[in-house]
Image (tube, rainbow, N blue to C red):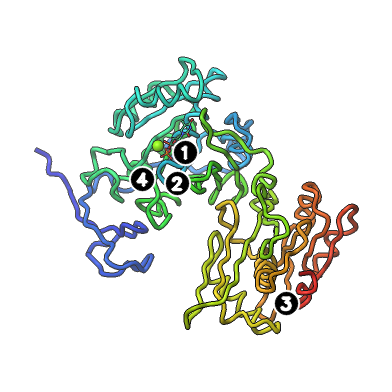
Amino acid sequence: MAKQKMTTVFYCSECGYESPKWMGQCPGCKAWNTFLEETVDKKSRGSSSINEVKGAPKAITEVDAKEKDRMTTGSGELDRVLGGGIVEGSLILVGGDPGIGKSTLLLQVCKNISDRGNEVLYVSGEESDRQIKIRADRIGSFTDKMILLCETDLDAIKSCITERKPKVVIIDSIQTMYNESVTSAPGSVSQVRETTGVLLRLAKSLNICIFIVGHVTKEGTMAGPRVLEHMVDTVLYFEGDRYASYRVLRSVKNRFGATNEIGVFMMQNNGLCEVQNPSEYMLNGRPVNAGGSVVTCSMEGTRPLLVEIQSLVCHSNFGIPRRQATGTDFNRLNLLLAVLEKRTELNIGSCDVYVNIAGGIKIAEPAIDLAIVMATVSSFRNKPVDPMTIAFGEVGLSGEVRAVSMAKNRVMEAKKLGFTRCIIPGVCLKDVGKTDMITVIGVNNVSDVLDYI
Ligand code: TYD
Ligand code: MG
């Protein structure tokens, strides 16, 4: 019997860092006690070529790669997130919390593509074919171009793909797939990594598009290795409040398009439907003439999105006041409060401050700083801000209001939704130019905005 060459390696379960021996702290992500022992087959390690034919270097001018038309997924929002549709031969990772709608979205993609006469293979390691059928019936009727395969063994999946050569393959989910040549359990770092490697080579060599579903951990990162994100062409995250019906699909990496682009969907009885005008949707149910509410505009990829910032300032009953940020960065909130305290006459330091972005969306862009400051001051003084006003701008440590990108697009979005006044960084006035039907006010310091509350 041939002697199998097995080696033992240790992987960090957080980021996939590989080490020949156990370590207490991961040098990659600095997490403690995350190293797990796994046995791997030496033969299976290292990847082979991803071109059809191995080897031969050639001049870039000889490579035949006219950008063929992208294939549409049948969903405008998903196409936008992908940068205009599916590129042939790409590997797309879709992550998100359980129950957020990953399987539903991909099933709808399958329906749209198979309805146009292209063969689609849906591989599920989580549900039986009957369960998938029940879900599919909620979405609509499918043609016989939609092929189901309930399998977790990668070799069987691989031979099915090479035999049928479908246009699009869905792997739901990568954590359930099992590669014979790797001895560790499904979902472990080396399994996930090797399986993705095999799928990557399949996608590139057969020129088909493969969607991979990945689960996320409690911390919000993809379960299994971070290396997965490096291997694939596109990483999409599905986020949103499980209790609200809308979902945001965000691209965090995209080799064929812009990143941070978002698509907005709504979960309904017959699957996910697109939200055409997310700004209008996000502002639904906004309190009118209430203190502590200010509308701002954030750029999500190339799309401006209006959201409502809510702030509540109240007297603290404890020695150390409480601060809470929902949907935005907690440390950023503390910084803004410190700036307010130092650069204005307001004595906010001894109050509890709660900031919330209505609708459950998460925004990391500093352009919302100015609105957070205004909402906080508005709540502190118990005076409402004019509901037809929006504000955006980054706030610096000396209280200066700094420029943000694409100011004009933001103002136009506000105008489209009927707002009449925009408070923007003074330096951006030039970019915005002359506008009608909306007053644009430039401010240079946080103390200037206090006049508008
Ligand atoms: P699912 O797509 O299975 O989520 P994931 O694959 O990300 O774990 O489930 C989405 C949720 O949406 C599930 O709780 C049921 C619900 N749902 C609807 O509300 N309407 C529908 O038409 C479908 C198919 C599911
Ligand atoms: Mg699922």
Pick the front one: 417 or 10:
417
**Which amino acid type is marked by label 2?**
Gly
In the figure, 138 relative to 309: above or below?
A: above
Gap between marks 1 and 3, in whole Å?
A: 42 Å
Nearer-N-terminus badge (1/3): 1
Name the residue carrying label 1: 101
Look at the numbered disc 3 and give the secondary structure of its residue.
Answer: loop
Residue 320, percent from left and from top:
48, 81
Tell me which amino acid carries mark 3. Glu
> According to the image, label 3 marks what residue?
400
- Of all residues, the one furthest to the left in this rendering is 1
Q: Residue at x 49, y 78 (%)?
A: 317
Give the mark nearer the N terminus: 4 vs 2.
Answer: 4
Tag 4 residue: 47
At mark 4, the secondary structure is loop
Query: Which quadrant does the N terminus fall into?
Result: top left
Q: Which mark is residue 96?
A: 2
